[in-house]
Image (spheres, helix red, strand yellow):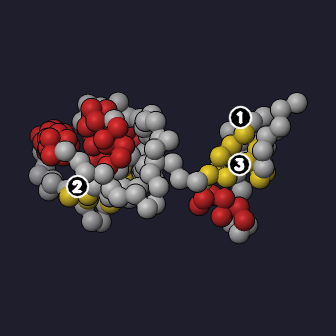
Amino acid sequence: MLPHMKTPRLPIALQQAVMRSLRHYLQLANDKLERRFDEPSLIYQQRGTAAGTAWLEKWEIRINPVLLLENQQAFVDEVVPHELAHLLVWKTFGRVPPHGKEWKWMMESVLGVPARRTHKFEIDSVRSNTFPYRCSCQQHQLTVRRHNRVLRGESEYRCVHCKSLLQPGEFLSK
């Protein structure tokens, strides 16, 4: 979504489906863990390519409205429990790795959902400007944030396949 575009209007039925999902998984956790967790706030203001984020101290889940509209059922089935699991893990175990063994256990054993770290949604509609980088085997696209970190000398990135350092510019096949 371009920065000047407004957040899309979400149909009430879709917001209700998200809330039903949240309450369903929260009830599962309450029953299995024999606790009473408060219902977190739902905020439909997540931007960028993240489907959602869990804000631990605020006890809220931020939802990407564009990706929700484009992936309704998968979102309700996967993203809602994924983000809820982060909140539940924080309340149960404190600060631990975000997708570590506690989160995996919460997802699979408590909520009964496969523990996948990332979504597989198409993100062209929410992708912002990217910058071309190359390694010795392929073309890469870095986000504005990562590109700026490279420019400031704060970070460097390597290809997960060939392990070579990413360089600004287009990949030229041989």
Q: Secondary structure at mark 2?
A: strand
What is the spatial separation of the Cα atoms under label 2 and label 3, in whole angstroms? 35 Å
Q: Residue at x 20, y 58 (%)?
A: 41
Label ID, residue 132: 3
Contact check, label 1 and label 3, Cβ < 8 Å: no
Q: As displayed, is residue 142 above or below residue 106?
A: below
Residue that badge 1 annotates: 161
Label ID, residue 24: none
Label ID, residue 42: 2
Please indicate whether residue 157 sits to the left or right of residue 128 in the image: right
Please indicate whether residue 156 sits to the left or right of residue 20 in the image: right
- Disc number lying in front (2 or 3): 3
Q: Residue at x 43, y 36 (%)?
A: 121
Q: Secondary structure at mark 3?
A: strand
Residue 45 coordinates in the image, percent (x, y): 32, 58
Categorize mark 1 by other alpha carbons within 10 Å: few (<14), some (14-19), many (20+): few
